[in-house]
Each structure stands twice: as C-alpha cells, then as structure tokens.
Image: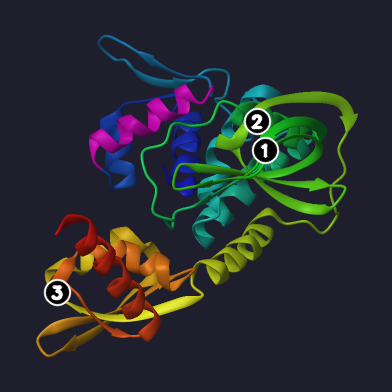
Amino acid sequence: MRADRLVAVLLLMQTRGRVTATELATELEVSVATARRDLEALSAAGIPVYPQPGRGGGWSLVGGARTDLSGLSAAEAQALFLLVGPAAALSEEAKAALRKLVRALPTTFRADAQAAAEATVIDPARWGERDRDRPEPVALLQDAVIRRRKVRLTYAGRDRRSERLVDPWGLVDKDDIWYLLAGTDAGRRTFRLDRIIAAETTGEPAERPDDFALAAAWQEVVTEMERRRSRTWATVLVEARFVRVLRDQFGRHCHDDGESDGRARVRLGAPTPLDIARHLAGWGAMIEVLEPASVRGELARIGGELTTRYS
C-alpha cells in the first residue's frame, strides 16, 4: 500500500464518516479490489477501521471522524505508522504524506509515532532469496526500537552461538529477509533475524546516536555488502532469452551489455571466480565465458572433475 494513498483513505473516511470500496476506488483512481485491500490492510494493522454490512453500509473509522486524527489511541497510532513508515522510504511523495500525517496527530502521540515510522525500512532489491516467512522476533524488536529498550539476543553466527546485549536501532526488510541494525560494545552491527535463536527485551534504556538515520545506515551496509559480493566480474555470451534466468541467479550483479554475435553480452559479479563458475557449470555449452581467465580455469577444473568421476 502506498503511504500517500493510505493518508488519503483515512482523511476521506474522517470527512465522510463512512465510505464504500467503490467510492474509494473512484476517488483514488484505483480498482475496487485495490481499495478493498487497502481497507482490509488498515483493519489488519490495528487501525479502528470496520466494515458495516447491509444496505447503506460501508467502512467507518471508529472515533476518527475528525481531520486531526485525534480518534486514534497511542497504540493505534503506532500500528498505523509501523504500516506506513516502510512505504515512505520508497518515494518522496510518500515521505511528504507521512510528515503531514505526523503533524495531524495529537502532540502526545507524535514522538512514538515518528519512532514507529522510522523503526523499519523496506529495501525492495533482491539478494536472490525468496518466499521466507516473517521471523518471529520482528514485533518484539520493533517495540524495543520504538521504546528504546536494550535487547538480549542469542545469536547463531557462522562459527558459534553467542549471547549479546544490544541497543536496537532499526529493522530492515530486504525482500522478506529481515535484518536488525544495532549498537554493540564493538560499534554498529547488523544481525540477520533468521539467525536469532532467542530475543528478550530488558528494562534497560537503549542508546542511539542523535544523528542516526536508519535508511542512510542501511545504505552503508548495502554498499559494503555489494562490494564484497562483486569482487570478481565475468563477461559471458548467452542467448537473449536466458538473460532473465541469469538475473534470477545473480540479482543486481547481472548487467546486460547488449548483443554480440547475435547473443546477449552479460556481465556477472560474485565474490570469487569459483562462485561464478559454480553457477555457470550447469549451463554447459549454452554459455560462453569470455573473461576473466580465472573463471574459465575454474570451469575447466570443474569439468575435469566431472569427467573423471562420471566418464
């Protein structure tokens, strides 16, 4: 759901008291199905939006028939901003809508609502993994970010399991893979939520730098990760119809450089020559690796091993 459309839905409901999905679709120039999904998303997020069945029915914002949104409770305001905040990172229009919505809240709710809006970032670019369930600690960690409480984590790293007391600064949802950015004794660290075995909020207040901005901090993490993931680049030739498959394999480290000899010329990035070779070995003669020699050498070695074992 777009954040600016969400604001429009709420203000329409407050102005009119009751609306139908058809009326919303007409006003917002979207399909009736989209308008209905928006209303259901608001309701599922804990906003007091309820359907009224029967003749003359529709959807109502209970207690919120005023343009200052003072019908929302503190908990409902937090639920609203947890829903709309991540979307606001994706466009300038959504950010503007979010700022207006903050100003429309009662003064006593604004700080927590703003914290909720900034507690999560959604990064839509893939790193090649799909269809993951939302990790169990998300709600607990979002609450700890908003209330600024330290969290004790039991974390499964690559080599060992450890316990850490961290200051939670923000959460990132990257294509259904969740990350926690947090302060530790060793500085800022990034934790994958699917490696968190247990999480417990403590009563200790968490510290966060005054100049911390979640979106900017996450961009630094992404930049460093992309640098590590693309230390080796290979140029290959493949039929144009297979570029989409390579893009699924390599994500943003797949660049189509046009055609050469009737085939697509593609650049592929990975941490090492062996990583690229492993991805391409199954393609056989369907892909021709032009460079570098290190990737061609790894493919030759893999081919030799397979020939020795299965010939």
Which residue extends farthest left?
262
Residue at (59, 68) in percent of width and height: 223
**Kind of residue sitting beneath label 3:** Ala
The mark nearer the N terminus, 2 or 3, is: 2
Residue at image position (49%, 57%) is: 90
For residue 77, say whether it is visible: no
Total numbered labels placed on residues in the image:
3
Which residue: 40% across, 81% down?
294
Numbered circle sitting on residue 116: 1
Quadrant position of residue 242? bottom left
Instruction: Give the position of the C terminus as an image quadrant.
Output: bottom left
Front one among 247 and 283:
283
Whole-percent x, y for residue 290 in the image: 27, 86
Left or right: 163 in relation to 214: right
In screen coordinates, is 182 left or right of 248?
Answer: right
Residue tagged by mark 2?
A: 78
The answer to whether residue 272 is above or below residue 177 is below
Instruction: Kindly identify the amino acid type of the residue bearing the numbered disc 1.
Output: Ala
Q: Is residue 184 above or below residue 295?
A: above
Marks 1/3: CA–CA distance: 45 Å
Determine the CA span between mark 1 and mark 2: 6 Å
Secondary structure at badge 3 equals helix
Amino acid type assigned to the residue bearing label 2 in the image:
Gln
Residue range corresponding to the magenta coloring: 31-46
* Cα–Cα gap, marks 2 and 3: 48 Å
Residue, disc 3: 240
